[in-house]
Image: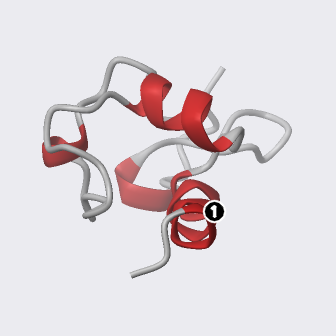
């Protein structure tokens, strides 16, 4: 149940203060900061599978380790 407090990217915090996660079917090109190492049509779920990470910042950090420029 949301507390009414706005969290990251307009998402709401639950009663424990956790911010809602992005849905796994969200598409990279629609994210606030798309991750350039992935296709614009890649889903967050696919990015989580490739990197083993959950959060968008963690995914972006991990993919840079896996695929250095």
Q: Residue at x 48, y 23 (%)?
A: 45
Quarter containing the N terminus: top right
Give the image location of residue 2, x and y in percent: 60, 30
Q: Position of residue 57 (x, y in %)?
A: 56, 64
Residue displayed at 71% across by 38% down: 52
Q: Is residue 13 above or below residue 61?
A: above
Residue 8 vertical placement versus 13 (above, below): below
Q: How is the image coloured?
A: secondary structure
**What residue is rendered at 41% in x and 32% in y?**
44
Seen in the picture, residue 48 relative to 17 is either above or below; the reply is above
Secondary structure category for the residue under label 1: helix
User: Viewer-proximal residue, 64 or 33?
Assistant: 64
Q: Is residue 59 above or below residue 14?
A: below
Q: For the C terminus, give its image quadrant.
A: bottom left
Residue 40 spot, x, y in % from top left: 14, 44
Q: Count the labels in the image.
A: 1
Location of residue 14 by image quarter = top right
Is residue 65 among the parts visible in the rendering? yes
Left or right side of 10 for 42: left
Q: Nearer the viewer, residue 11 or 28?
A: 28
Question: Residue sitting at 30 percent across and 27 percent down?
Answer: 26
User: Is residue 21 among what the camera can see?
Assistant: no
* Relative horizontal placement of residue 37, taking residue 58 as reference (left or right): left
Residue occupied by mark 1: 62
Dot 1 crowding, Cα within 10 Å, few <14, some 14–19, many 20+ = some
- Foreground of the two, 67 or 20: 67
Which residue is at the far right? 16
């Amino acid at each position: 149940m949301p507390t009414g407090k706005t969290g990251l990217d307009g998402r709401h915090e639950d009663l424990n203060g956790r911010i809602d996660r992005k849905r796994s079917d969200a598409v990279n090109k629609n994210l606030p900061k798309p991750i350039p190492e992935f296709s614009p049509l890649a889903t967050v779920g696919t990015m989580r599978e490739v990197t083993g990470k959950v959060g968008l910042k963690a995914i972006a950090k991990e993919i840079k380790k896996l695929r250095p420029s």
